[in-house]
Image (cartoon, rainbow, N blue to C red):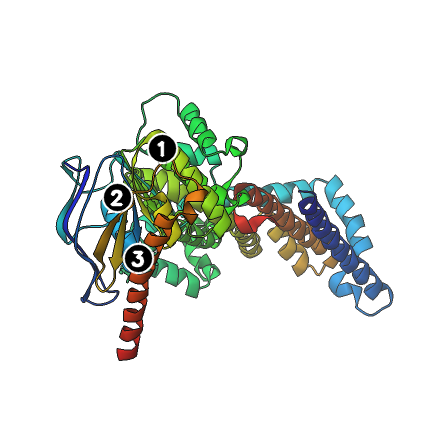
């Protein structure tokens, strides 16, 4: 227990130190003229600009727009991915029927469909949500599928020996046994959904972090652009950490999970 | 009539990726009286587990029949409970949750599940560990939970497949004595697979010796050692005699195995 806490602390401390290290390196590299600030600005300028954007409300507006699309796309991907994954994991026929789509999704870049979505849903929020939904769907579906499909046969047989019916085995053995793998899928999905939202916003939006990045990027206002980039990175780390934490809560029963 | 009647039992498995069949058990006849403790010995792969799973109703019979109290076995039933060779506890459930599992599956209606489970957990000596999860227990403790889970559903017949197979010799002996203590109180019919000769004799009223290719019964040996038994019995002359007989049987099997390998 104490060792576990220490391990967690240690990881946190090391992670934080390396982040600080990069920021310091960034500042020094620019101060010593090693890198031209025109391309990447400096931490101190970005911090100052952050305060400006924070006070004029544009940070809140952009973060809210991005999070709105993120929550919708992740929520939809979670619902659809888990339902389809469970069905495909339990019924081999469903898996075979869905397989071509999955291969298609793995081999074709999702953003390539951007124009199609624009044609169907128009510029803006619905298209952004659709793209990010597709980004997040695959890992959630694939993990749920493998979790259910790889249900421990010995456990299923033990359940049957006590007279369990297929539905009992599904609810009491397959589903609870898959929760940790599903959570891992969701954690991957969180990262993918955020990426999806930001990438789609780069192409066309009226607000959001991705929109701000392209907007200032095209104006060559590197410092203003960096504010949004840093926020995206911090958001991504934060959300993934939350999911990792939830994941560790759900698989504490796993023998190899005490880390 | 005997409680378990196995007649001319044969079980074939389909070989993976082909239509060939492999006969795992053939021409097995066996009757077991109510309350009898029967151990099954034989070299690895001779079909002990297969025979036990057939009685449990977990594998399909190819030939012959199995009856329990005159009723034909065609699937698992509440009259039987199994303690498996492999770890088969739900890792996400506590000890109590696992013991309750069998009761839940059987839609147990004999009173409070928690109370019933706790009673069984105390019976196997794990009262203090009811909130532990399987990964926090030793191998011996886990097998106790498996036994408690099987006993909880109050079966007529207890089917045990090398429940102490993964334990060291000493723990094994202790568990064997414990098992006898529990069995003597509950008086359930027991089928117990093992490949430990001493264990087979120590527990049994009757020892079934199996041979391989295909799995069949070579001999049924009656054990007349007095009960209740304790470790002292391991040094008695009668025990030595039985041990010698079983050794000879199993040695025979090993040499025939070598022969097969040489031919192949
Ligand atoms: N599901 C299966 N499909 C095909 N063959 C099987 C299957 N289960 C067992 N067998 C084969 O049947 C034979 C008997 O297996 P079984 O598990 O009953 O042996 P056992 O006596 O319990 O061995 P051990 O002492 O090693 O547990 C073996 O040759 C094994 O390869
Ligand atoms: Mg076996």
Q: Chain of mark 1?
A: B
**Left or right of residue B87: residue A60:** right
| Residue at figure coordinates x 34%, y 38% from the top left | B226
Residue A130's place in the image compared with A32, above or below, is above
Give the labeled residue for mark 2: B56
| Side of A127 relative to B204 (left or right) | right
- B87 vs A32, left or right, is left
Query: Who comes first in sequence, dot 1 or dot 2?
Result: 2
Does residue A105 sit above or below A54 in this rendering? below
Q: Which mark is residue B184?
A: 1
Camera-nearest label, 1 or 2: 1
What subunit carries mark 2? B
- Residue drawn at 60 percent across, 53 percent down: A210
Percent from the top left, x then y, of residue B53? 27, 48
Chain ID of residue with mark 3: B
Which image quarter has ligand 1? bottom left
The answer, for residue A73, to whether it is visible in the render is no
Q: Residues within 10 Å of mark 1 (few under 14, many from 20)?
A: some
Q: How far across and down, in percent of the image, does residue B64 sit? A: 12, 50
Q: Residues within 10 Å of mark 2 (few under 14, many from 20)?
A: many
Task: Respond whether the residues carrying marks 1 and 3 are from the same subunit.
Answer: yes
Q: Which residue is mark 3?
A: B245
Q: Quadrant of the N terminus of chain A?
A: top right
Q: Residue furthest bottom?
A: B263
């Amino acid at each position: 227990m104490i060792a576990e806490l220490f391990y967690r602390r240690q990881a946190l401390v090391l992670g934080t130190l390396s982040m600080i290290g990069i920021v310091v390196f960034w500042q020094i590299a620019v101060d010593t003229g090693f890198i031209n600030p025109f391309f990447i600005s400096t931490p101190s300028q970005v911090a100052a600009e952050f305060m400006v954007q924070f006070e004029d409300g544009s940070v809140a507006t952009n973060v809210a727009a991005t999070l709105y699309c993120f929550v919708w796309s992740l929520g939809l991907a979670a619902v659809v991915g888990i339902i389809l994954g469970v069905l495909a994991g339990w019924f081999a026929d469903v898996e075979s029927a869905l397989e071509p789509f999955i291969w298609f999704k793995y081999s074709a870049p999702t953003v390539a469909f951007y124009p199609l979505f624009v044609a169907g849903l128009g510029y803006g929020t619905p298209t952004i949500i659709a793209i990010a939904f597709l980004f997040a769907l695959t890992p959630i579906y694939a993990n749920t599928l493998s979790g259910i499909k790889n249900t421990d046969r010995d456990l299923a047989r033990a359940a049957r020996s006590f007279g369990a019916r297929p539905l009992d085995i599904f609810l009491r053995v397959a589903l609870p046994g898959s929760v940790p793998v599903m959570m891992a899928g969701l954690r991957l999905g969180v990262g993918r959904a955020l990426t999806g939202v930001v990438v789609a916003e780069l192409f066309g939006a009226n607000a959001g972090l991705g929109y701000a990045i392209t907007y200032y990027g095209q104006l060559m206002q590197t410092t203003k652009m960096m504010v949004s980039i840093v926020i995206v990175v911090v958001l991504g780390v934060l959300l993934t950490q939350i999911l990792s934490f939830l994941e560790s809560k759900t698989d504490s029963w796993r023998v190899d999970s005490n880390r | 009539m005997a409680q378990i009647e196995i007649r001319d039992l044969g079980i074939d498995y389909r070989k993976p990726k082909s239509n060939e069949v492999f006969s795992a058990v053939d021409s097995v006849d066996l009757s077991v009286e109510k309350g009898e403790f029967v151990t099954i010995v034989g070299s690895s792969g001779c079909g002990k587990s297969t025979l036990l799973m057939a009685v449990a109703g977990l594998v399909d019979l190819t030939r012959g029949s199995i009856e329990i109290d005159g009723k034909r076995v065609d699937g698992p039933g509440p009259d039987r409970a199994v303690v498996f060779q492999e770890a088969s506890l739900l890792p996400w459930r506590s000890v109590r949750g696992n013991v309750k599992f069998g009761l839940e599956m059987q839609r147990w209606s004999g009173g409070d599940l928690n109370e019933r489970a706790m009673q069984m957990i105390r019976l196997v000596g794990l009262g203090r560990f009811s909130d532990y999860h399987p990964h926090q227990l030793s191998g011996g403790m886990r097998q106790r939970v498996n036994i408690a889970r099987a006993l909880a559903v109050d079966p007529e017949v207890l089917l045990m497949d090398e429940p102490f197979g993964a334990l060291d010799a000493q723990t094994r002996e202790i568990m064997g004595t414990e098992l006898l203590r529990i069995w003597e109180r509950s008086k359930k019919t027991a089928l117990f697979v093992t490949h430990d000769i001493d264990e087979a004799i120590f527990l049994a009223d009757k020892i079934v010796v199996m041979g391989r290719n295909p799995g069949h019964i070579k001999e049924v040996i009656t054990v007349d050692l007095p009960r209740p038994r304790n470790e002292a019995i391991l040094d008695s002359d009668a025990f030595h005699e039985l041990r010698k007989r079983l050794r000879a049987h199993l040695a025979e099997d090993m040499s025939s195995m070598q022969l097969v390998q040489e031919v192949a």
